[in-house]
Amino acid sequence: MGRYEKPVKAALRSLHEGRFLEKLWAKDATIWTSDPEIQMRIKNRLGWLTVAEEMTHRAGELMAFARTVRDAGFTHVVLLGMGGGSLCAEVCREIYGVASGCPDLAVLDSTDSATILKIEKSVNLERTLFILASKSGTTIETQSLYRYFSDRLATLKPGPVGEQFVAITDPGTPLETLARAQAFRRIFLNAPDIGGRYSALSYFGLVPLALIGMDLPRFLERAQGMVRASGSAVPMEDNPGAWLGIVLGALGLQGLDKVTLILSPAVRSFGGWLEQLLAESTGKEGKGLIPVDGEPIGRPEVYSPDRLFVHLKAAWDADETPDQKILALQASGHPVVRILLSDPLDLAAEFFRWELATATAGAILGVNPFDEPNVTESKENTGKLLEAFRTTGRFPSSPMVLEQKGVRLYSEQEKNPAGSLQESLRLFLGRAKRSGYVAMMVYLERSDLNEALLQTVRARIRDRYRLAVTLGYGPRFLHSTGQLHKGGPKTGCFLQITSEDRDDLPIPGQPYGFSILKRAQVLGDYLSLSRRGLPLLRIDLGRDEKNGLQTLAESV
C-alpha cells in the first residue's frame, strides 16, 4: 500500500470498533444505513452470505438434471440472460471449458442482430437447450430472445417446444408463469433474497456449471473454504474478504477509485463479472469505484495517481509478462493488491471473496451495495421510446454536428461544432476532468476485429490523456457499468459508438425487430446521460463498421 497504508489501517480500526463482521454475519443492515426503510430492503438481499452451504445440498440434484439433458441428446446450451444472470456462466465456460460428452455452452446477452445470428448458426437448434435467466422475470432482452428462438423452433418441428427451455428466476415472476404455461423442461426458483450480481453461487451460476460437467461438490467446497475464512470469528486483518474490501473502500475515499484489474490470461474473463459487481454495487449517490477491466497494461508514466491495481495471478499460467509490468508499477509508487490462484477451482472462492469485499467497501464508501436505481431508469427509457415508436413509427432525432468519411457525430452539447472528427475528439476529451475517466459504450458486434480496433482507440486515449478508459458492449453494460455511469462520480466522459445494422431480425408478436430494440436502448441511455449534463458524444460509424472504426482510430 505504500503511503496509503495509514488510511487502510484507520478504516480497519473503524470497522473493528463498529463490530462490522459480527453485524454482517448477523445480517444487520445498520452497517450500511441508518434509514429503517432501506435497512429492510437490504435484509432481503443478504442471502448470498449462506447460499454456498445451501446449494451443497442441491448439487446432486443439479448434476442429475445435467445427466438427463445429456441423455436427451442435447449438444448445445444457449443461456439467454443479462448481467448477473449470465456473467458467471460466461466466466466459467471460458475458464473451465466443457467436460467430455457434455453440451457446449454459449451466452447470448445482446440485442445485436449479427450477434444473435452468429450464435444461431453455431448450434443445431433442434438439439439446443435454451436457459432463460432473469431474477425479475421481466428482462426485455431475455423476453425478446425467447420469442425469437421459440418461433424459430416452432418452424422446425411440430408440437410444443417448451421441452427445449429452462427457466431460472425468482418465485412468482412473469417468467415463472410463462415457463409453467409453456411446459418448460425445468424451472429453477432461486432464493429471492439474492441480488443478480451476488448470485454466482446460486442456481444462476450453478445450473450452467452442472450442464458443462463441473464437479459441483468440489466447486462448492472450495467456495465454502472462503466463506469460513471470512467468518465473524476471523480477525479482520486475517479475513480475506473483509481485508480486500477495506483496501478498496479506504483507497477509494483517498481518490484512488480506478480499480484496474490485471488478470492472468487463463482467468481473464473473470474481469467481466468483477466489473459488474463493483460498478453496479458502489456506483451511486455520486460515489463509487470505477473498475477498469481489459485495459492493456501501459508504462507507469501513463497512469495518473488515481489507480489501485489488482493482480489476479493464475499459478498454472506460464505468462510472466504481467508480473514484470506489475513490479514496475509498484516501484513507481502505485498501490498493488496481489491475489494468487493455486488452481482453477480457486475461482469458486474468489466469487465469494469479492462479494464480501464489495459489501465491505460499500459500508466504507457510505452506499447501499445491494440496489441499482439507475438500471431501472434505463429500462423505463427504453420502454417509453418503444411505445413512441409503436405510435409514430419513429424515434426522436438527435442533432448531428459532423459527418466525415461516413462517420457521423451527434451531441446535445456542442454549439459550435469543430471542422473535423479529429478536432471534435480533441475538444471533447480535453474537457475530461483530471481525476476522471472515459467510458467507451459500444453497440457493435463483439468480433475479434472490432475488439482489436477498439482496444487501439482505448490505449491511445489513455496514453495521451492519462485517463482510465473503460470499454463496454451494449446492451450488456446497461446491466452493469450503466449504473455507475449515471449514479457514480460525475467524472466520466462518454463516447457512445454505434453503427447501422446490416441485418434485422424480427421479434415475434412485436411491431419491431431487434434493430429497433437496440436503437431504443442506445437512445434511452443517450437521453439519460444527456439530461444529467454529462459530457457525451455519439459516434455513428455508418454501415461499414470496419472502415468507421479505422477512421476513429486514426483520428484519435
Image: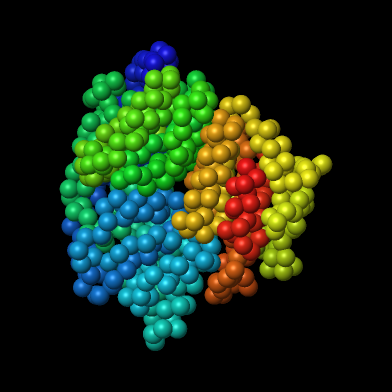
In the foreground, 402 or 521? 402
Name the residue: 25% across, 30% down: 231
Placement of the N terminus among the 4 image quadrants:
top left
Is residue 166 visible in the rendered structure shown here?
A: no
Quarter assignment of residue 296: top left
Q: Is residue 455 left or right of residue 535?
A: left
Rendered position, 33 above or below 517: above
Name the residue: 52% across, 39% down: 459
Rendered position, 157 above or below 102: below
Q: Position of residue 550 (x, y in %)?
A: 59, 52
Q: Position of residue 160 (x, y in %)?
A: 39, 81
In the foreground, 270 or 192? 270
Q: Position of residue 518 (x, y in %)?
A: 59, 60
Please count the marks in the image. Answer: 0
Name the residue: 62% across, 42% down: 556
Name the residue: 38% across, 30% down: 325
Q: Position of residue 471 (x, y in %)?
A: 52, 45
Quarter assignment of residue 386: bottom right
In the foreground, 28 or 99? 99
